[in-house]
Image (cartoon, helix red, strand yellow):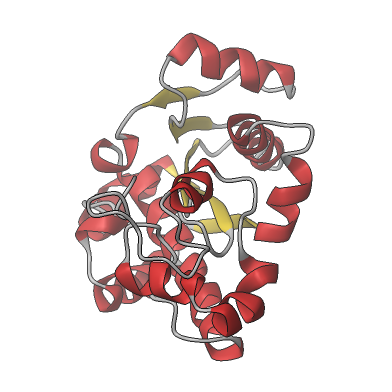
Amino acid sequence: MLSIIAGIDEAGRGPVIGPLVVCCASCRRDDEKLLKKLASKDSKALTAAQREEAYEKLKKFVTFRWVEISAGDLNGLMDTMSLNDIEAKTMADLIKKLGDGDTMIDMPDRYGWTFRKRMEKFGVKKFEAEHKADENYPIVAAASICAKIMRDKKIEEIRKATCDFGSGYPGDPKTRAALKDKEKRKSLEPFIRQKWKTLENIKQTKLFTDEEPEQGAAGAE
């Protein structure tokens, strides 16, 4: 029986606009040497072109599965679940599709015991999780690359359908300007994470009024 290794990571946890994408990458342990050559860095350390190039090569021997959770779905789910529970459930569902294998997760929770309790709640006990796993494990870096590419593609689709709102992160001046503009904000409404703490911080800077935000406050988070 072939030995399988898997890694899980997400893209888009912090933005106020657009989806959260959780990806699971898996391959045979025998391919680990090749994996290290192609996924030695996590997605944040690569340019968009480098990610695409690596992804095309990785697809030849790595199986990628991902789940895209839209802003609208997140708004609904967060009526009854925390963001960390949403992530844990999504990760657990992806692991269940793997079958047997060793899985490493880039841990979203601050404490390992908290994250383990979440995963066990959703029916998964066999896994490992570490902070910065995307920097230390090539299979997690591969998942990070895929998640980032899939989120970026969706963000580009949203831009084409609405307006240029930048990255969607609250620290981005373009994002803040788009959210302050009444017409742009109206077109973006279906893609805004209404229950995000980052959005609350933006609102507190009077971004959603005609007044200018207080100096130094607009870049919160």
Which quadrant, please, contains the C terminus?
top left
Q: Is residue 85 visible?
A: yes
Provide residue 166's location: percent of width, then percent of height.
Answer: 38, 75
Q: Can you say whether 151 is above or below 22 in the image? A: below
Provide residue 189's location: percent of width, then percent of height.
Answer: 66, 70
Q: Is residue 167 visible?
A: no
Provide residue 10's location: percent of width, then percent of height.
Answer: 48, 48
Which quadrant, please, contains the N terminus?
top right
Q: Can you say whether 56 is above or below 133 in the image? A: below
Image quarter for residue 158?
bottom right
Q: Can you say whether 98 is above or below 151 in the image? A: above
> Which residue is drawn at the image coordinates 65% and 31% (left, top)?
82
Q: How many marks?
A: 0
Provide residue 93's location: percent of width, then percent of height.
Answer: 71, 39
The one nearer the camera, 68 or 169, is: 169
In the visual, does 103 lie left or right of 87? left
